[in-house]
Image (spheres, grey):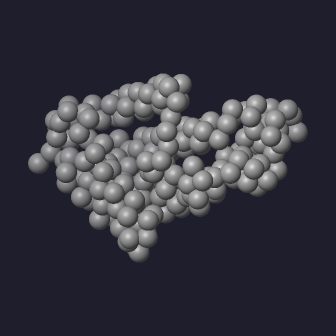
Amino acid sequence: MSRQNRTSELKSRVLSAALNRFTETGIERTNVGDILEDADCSVGSLYHHFGNKEGIAEALFIQGSKQFNQNLLDALLRHNKAEPGVKAIVTWCCQWVTEQPKLAAYMLSREIKLSEQAKLEMRELDQSFREALIRWFAPRIESGELKNLHFNVYVPLISGPTLEYSRMWLTGRYTRSPDTIAKVMAEAAWQSVREV
């Protein structure tokens, strides 16, 4: 195994171990020693690659954001028409939360505090994601398939109810997993943005 592959594998182990610990006990109460033990990682390696526990938390959040954005775009860009595209966003979000509840709970939590450097990286990620969404949405707005709204309104209308339902499910307040209500949520999202 090459050095690059070993480094990548080590980082993956640390992030996986951290995700388990963060979702079980929270970031603040997680002991770095537990992450080291779970990931079979030395103190020196952990601090070399992540800096500290907060660096691990940031890296996990940024990696999760990159994966989320890319996979959502992959689901969306398979569609040329507005209705299946909008519904694909919601359906994919419901499946993602159901299949990756720990990561979803972590990403949707409000416990993460980002450094200025991490905030900058997230702004760049968000900008790139927003531009990709605009490229897909703009022609469908111009063609009259979608309501002509300020762009910032589309994401809350389409994914807001799904993410709120997901938070309730992840905290145990709802028992039906998001994937079981994906069709209902997808239809509601479509009705909220379709031009009539």
Give the side of residue 19 with respect to residue 98, left or right.
right
The answer to whether 49 is drawn above or below residue 107 in the figure is above
Q: Nearer the viewer, residue 99 or 132?
A: 99
- Asked where in the image residue 41 lies, by quadrant, the reply is top right
Give the side of residue 104 with respect to residue 85, left or right.
right
Q: Farthest residue toward the left?
A: 196
| Residue 186 seen in the figure | no
List x then y, in percent, for residue 15. Answer: 67, 46
Residue at 20% of width from left, 41% of height from top?
146
The answer to whether 153 is drawn above or below residue 186 in the figure is above
| Residue 98 seen in the figure | yes
List x then y, in percent, for residue 159. Answer: 33, 50
Residue at 56% of width from left, 54% of height from top?
26
Q: Farthest residue toward the right?
A: 1
Q: Nearer the viewer, residue 26 or 136?
A: 26
Q: Nearer the viewer, residue 28 or 157?
A: 28
